[in-house]
Image (cartoon, grey):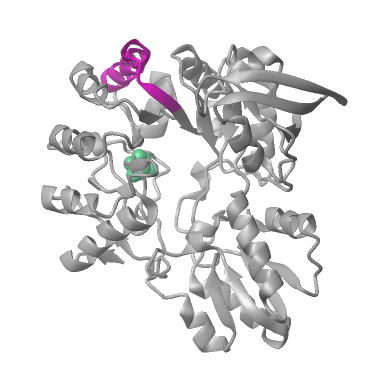
Amino acid sequence: MQITDPDKINKFIEESAYGENILPITSICDTGCIFCSRGCNPPEIHRADIGLASLEQIFGAFEFLDPGIPIIIGESAGIIEEGEPTLHPDFPAIFERLIEHFPNTPVEMKTNGRNLDRNLLDLLKKKDNLKLDVYLNSASARGRKLLMNESSDTSARTLENIKLLSEYGIAFSGSIIAFPNITGWEDIRLTLKYFSDNKAETVRVHPPSHSRYADAGVFPDSCDFIFELKDFINSIRDEIDCPVLVDPSVLTDLTPEVSGMLKNSPAWDAGIRSGDIILSVNSHKPMCRTDAWNRLSEAGRITAAVKSDGVIETLEWDNPRQFCSGITMEFDFVPSRADRLRQVIEYTAGKVYLLTSESGFELIRSLMQLFKIEKDKAEVIKVMNQSFGGTINVSGLLTVDDFLAVIHDNHAIAAEASLIILPYESFSCSGNDLKFCHFTKIRNETGIDVITL
Ligand code: SF4
C-alpha cells in the first residue's frame, strides 16, 4: 500500500530521523537491480515513496537527529523507500548544511558510486568523519549488466570512481549482494579483490532473501546457501587484504571469534588472525562478539588473551585511536540490551516469552544460557514471517500478525505468560509495524503484557 498523504510522509521522515538517525533525502533510485524488492511487498505493507524530499523536509528533520551517534544517509528507513542520495539535485546544498550543523558527528552514506566524480568527492572530502558504503554488487561489466542491467559506459565510470576514493582519502566499505547463480563465484571473488585492491576498509557480502511475491528463480535456491557463501569466503580469505563479513550472518552462539582482519593493522601486527577466540580484553571476559569488539576497539593499550588453534597466548598492542584495531567480528548482541533483557526477566513475576525472528532465535537462546535463565522463567519462541513469506527471516520485517499467529498457535503462551517481549526492530519508534499496526494490539487481543526491547 503506497502512502501518499503528505502529512504522513512528513511524520515518517521525522520518525526515521528521530528513531534511527537516518536522514531520508530521496526514494529515487537509478540502479535497476533485477532482485529489487520494490513491487514485491505484500499489499498490506505500507510503503512511502518520498520522491525528492523538499529542503524544508530535509532541514526540518535535522532537529530530530542525534549528534552523538552517526547520521545515516541513503539507508532504507522503515516505511520510506530507500533511494540514491546523490541523485537529489540539491545534494551539494544538503551536504554543506549537514557539515555546518553537525561538524563533529560521523556521517555514513550508502551509495551506488555512479556519481562519485571529482566534483562530488571535493565536496565529500570536506567532512572529516565521513564513511561511504558503496554497493557495487559486481566489479565486472558483465556482472553489472546481469545484476543491474547497467550499460558498459556506466559500469566503466562507476568502477573508475571507486579508484578515486583512496586518492581522496575518503574512508569506505564495500557491499555485495551475492548471486553466484547468476554471475558465478569467480565474479564475487574478483569483486572482493577489487574492493580490497582499492583500499576498502571492509566488505560486507549479503546473502539475498526475497518475499513470496518475488521471482524465486532469480535467487540462489539452496537453503544452505549461507554456509556455501561462508565456506567460499573462507577459501579466498588469504587473497583479500581487508576483512570480509557475511551480513546478516547465521550466528548460533555468542563466542567472540575474530571473523576478519585488516592486514598490517595494529592487531594484525600483534598476531591476531581470523578464527582466533578472544578470551579476555584488558582483564575483562567479553560476554559476546560485540562486547569483545567494542573493548578491542578502544583507543590505547590493549592486552588480549587469545585462543588460536587451541593455543592460548597473550597479545598486546596500541590502538592510536578508537576503532582502528583492524579486527572485525560479526555483530551479535549489544551488551546493554542483553543486560536490560536479563533485568526485565528477573524482575518480572511469572514467566516471560521472548518472540524472535528465525535468524535471532539461536542467539537469544544462547543469551538465556549465558545468564543461566531456566525455561520455566523465560522461553524463546521462533516466529516465522508469514506476512512476507519466501525466505525473509529477520526481525525487522515481522508484523503484529506474525506474532499473533504464533501466540494463537501456542496455547502455553496464553496459559503461562506474564509478559511477552518482542524485538524492537519490528516496530517504528512510535510502535507501529510495517502494516501500520501498533504492537499493543497483542495485549488488547490476548490480555498479556507486551513490551518491545
Ligand atoms: S539499489 Fe535498492 S532500490 Fe535501487 S534497484 Fe537496487 S535494490 Fe532496488
Per the image, is 167 magenta?
A: yes
Up/down of 105 relative to 158, above or below: below
- Residue range (magenta): 152-173
Question: Residue at horizontal 66%, vertical 82%?
Answer: 418
For image coordinates 63% across by 31% down, the residue present is 296
| Image x and y of residue 334, in percent | 59, 49
Q: Which residue of the protein is positioned furthest toward the right in this rendering?
A: 310
Q: Is residue 255 above or below residue 408?
A: above
Q: Position of residue 110 (x, y in %)?
A: 35, 36
Q: Could you tell me what secondary structure mostly forms the magenta stretch? A: helix
> In the depicted view, which residue is nearer to us: 396 or 424?
424
Which quadrant, please, contains the C terminus?
Answer: bottom right
Q: Tell me where residue 144 sits by quadrant.
A: top left
Indicate the quadrant where residue 447 lies. Answer: bottom right
Q: Residue 142 or 372: which is nearer the viewer? A: 372
Q: Is residue 300 above or below residue 369?
A: above
Indicate whether 92 appears above or below 291.
Answer: above
Q: Residue at x 45, y 65 (%)?
A: 427
Indicate whether residue 161 is drawn in magenta: yes
Which is more toward the observer, 32 or 451? 451
Is any atom of residue 92 visible in this view?
yes
Where does the image place residue 76, in percent across and percent down from the top left?
36, 49
Whether residue 449 sits left or right of residue 81 in the image: it is right
Task: Write down which quadrant ligand 1 falls in.
Answer: top left
Name the residue located 23 percent from the left edge and 45 percent from the top edge.
25
Count of labels in the image: 0
From the viewer's perspective, is 215 left or right of 67? right
Position of the N terminus by quadrant: bottom left
In this view, the residue in front, 67 or 11, is 67
